[in-house]
Image (tube, rainbow, N blue to C red):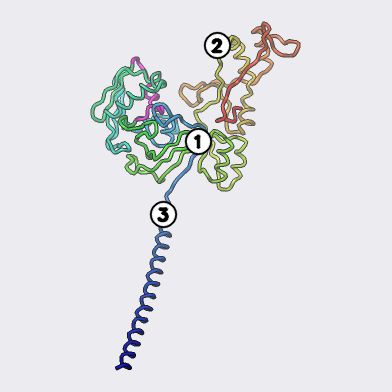
């Protein structure tokens, strides 16, 4: 009996060992399969597509009716927009017509939704414009509105005067259409664009994510980051360090280095922007037209365009692009210091003992104010 018991005990022990070994092997196989599965999942996992942009000027808020960044960031849209040929094209408005000299009727596309899922109709557009006009001094001046009426997908504007340019003024970024009932519009406006706000840190960045229900087709990017930095050199370095994908207003002295970087390229295209000097008409000296004409003649536009701007500019003949219907077609003012001096003499200025122009005991001098965001103006 004792022998049999021992044998039985040995058999039982061996069986348990066998079961134990089998369980260990099964566990190892299962763990290996789990590891392979996770590896396969990680291999097939698609990384979110994103882009990081760096701008020079930070807005004071994200309120579309006082700031412009929301249109540029794809958060908000306007009724109409300008294409590459400077022609007015539909955006949120499917069509429009001028009913009479003062009345304009717009039809809003069906099916457009705000980021909160609510529909965009004539009433929503009317409410947005009423808020915009209340807050935006630019729109108060530009639109000259007397009344706004809404019915279904239609919104009708009536101006105070005959105003053929009304349609072109609607491209102003402050004319963005937003959900006026949204909370905290200054931090997270609810617009109609392809991206919606995730977070906003003033003077630092805006975090955006794709709006999947965007009326014109979802964006190919999953998210975007818009950063702000007034230092042009920092913006340039952010490109070279790959911290940013796109940077605006790069210092001209940094362009050559960027062009020589394999993974970067510079896109320089004509724009509607012009660099110009605004005179303080409260200064008696500036009130003299001959002084202003003389100052115009000592600005060497070709040298500025070619040397300071490194060829990424053209001499301007006025504040408006020559391709605009109202842009001047005249030639720009030629650099002519001798004629400028003659004009100043006509204005009563004479060289003093120190070789400086003086009138009535006051030396001709100018103080020019500019800002860091545009290093080429320094």
Residue carrying label 3: 46
Image quadrant in which you'd find residue 153: top left
Dot 3: what SS? loop
The N terminus: image quadrant: bottom left
Q: Please tell me which residue is depicted at 58% across the width and 41% down the height of the picture.
A: 237
Residue 108 in percent (x, y) is at 29, 31
Going from the N terminus, do you reach mark 3 or mark 1 first?
3
**Magenta extent:** 160-177
Tag 2 near tag 1, CB within 8 Å:
no
Image quadrant in which you'd find residue 129: top left
Residue carrying label 2: 282
Residue 259 in percent (x, y) is at 59, 42
Q: Which mark is residue 115?
A: none
Question: Badge 2: how crowded within 10 Å, few (<14), some, or many (20+)?
Answer: few
Task: Report the Cα–Cα distance between label 3 and label 2.
Answer: 62 Å
Image quadrant in which you'd find residue 193: top left
Going from the N terminus, do you reach mark 2 or mark 1 first?
1
Q: Is residue 332 above or below residue 238?
A: above
Q: Please tell me which residue is depicted at 23% across the width and 27% down the height of the picture.
A: 151
Residue carrying label 1: 228
């Amino acid at each position: 009996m004792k022998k049999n018991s021992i044998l039985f005990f040995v058999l039982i022990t061996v069986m348990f060992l066998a079961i134990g070994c089998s369980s260990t092997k099964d566990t190892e196989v299962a763990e290996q399969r789990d590891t392979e599965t996770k590896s396969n999942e990680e291999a097939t996992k698609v990384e979110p597509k994103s882009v990081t942009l760096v701008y020079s000027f930070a807005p004071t808020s994200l309120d579309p009716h006082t700031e412009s960044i929301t249109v540029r960031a794809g958060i908000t849209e306007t009724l109409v927009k300008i294409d590459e040929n400077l022609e007015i094209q539909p955006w949120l408005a499917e069509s429009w017509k001028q009913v009479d000299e003062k009345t304009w009727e717009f039809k809003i596309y069906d099916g457009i939704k705000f980021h909160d899922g609510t529909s965009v109709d004539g009433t929503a557009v009317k409410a947005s414009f009423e808020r915009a006009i209340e807050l935006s001094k630019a729109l108060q001046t530009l639109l000259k509105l007397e009344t706004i009426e809404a019915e279904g997908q239609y919104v009708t504007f009536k101006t105070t005067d005959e105003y053929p340019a009304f349609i072109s003024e609607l491209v102003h970024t402050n004319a963005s259409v937003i959900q006026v009932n949204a909370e905290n519009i200054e931090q997270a406006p609810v617009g109609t664009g392809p991206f919606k706000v995730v977070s906003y840190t003033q003077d630092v960045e805006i975090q955006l994510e794709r709006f999947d229900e965007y009326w014109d087709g979802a964006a190919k990017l999953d998210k975007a980051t818009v950063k702000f930095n007034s230092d042009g050199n920092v913006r340039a370095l952010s490109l070279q360090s790959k911290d940013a994908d796109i940077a605006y207003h790069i210092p001209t002295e940094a362009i050559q280095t960027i062009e020589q970087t394999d993974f970067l390229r510079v896109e320089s295209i004509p724009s509607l922007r012009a660099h110009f000097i605004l005179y303080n008409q409260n200064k008696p000296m500036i009130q003299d037209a001959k002084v202003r004409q003389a100052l115009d003649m000592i600005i060497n536009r070709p040298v500025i365009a070619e040397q300071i701007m490194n060829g990424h500019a053209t001499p301007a003949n006025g504040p408006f692009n020559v391709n605009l219907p109202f842009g001047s077609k005249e030639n720009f003012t030629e650099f002519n210091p001798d004629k400028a001096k003659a004009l100043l003499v006509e204005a009563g200025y004479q060289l003093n003992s120190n070789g400086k122009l003086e009138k009535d005991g006051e030396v001709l001098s100018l103080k020019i104010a500019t800002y860091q965001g545009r290093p080429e103006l320094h």
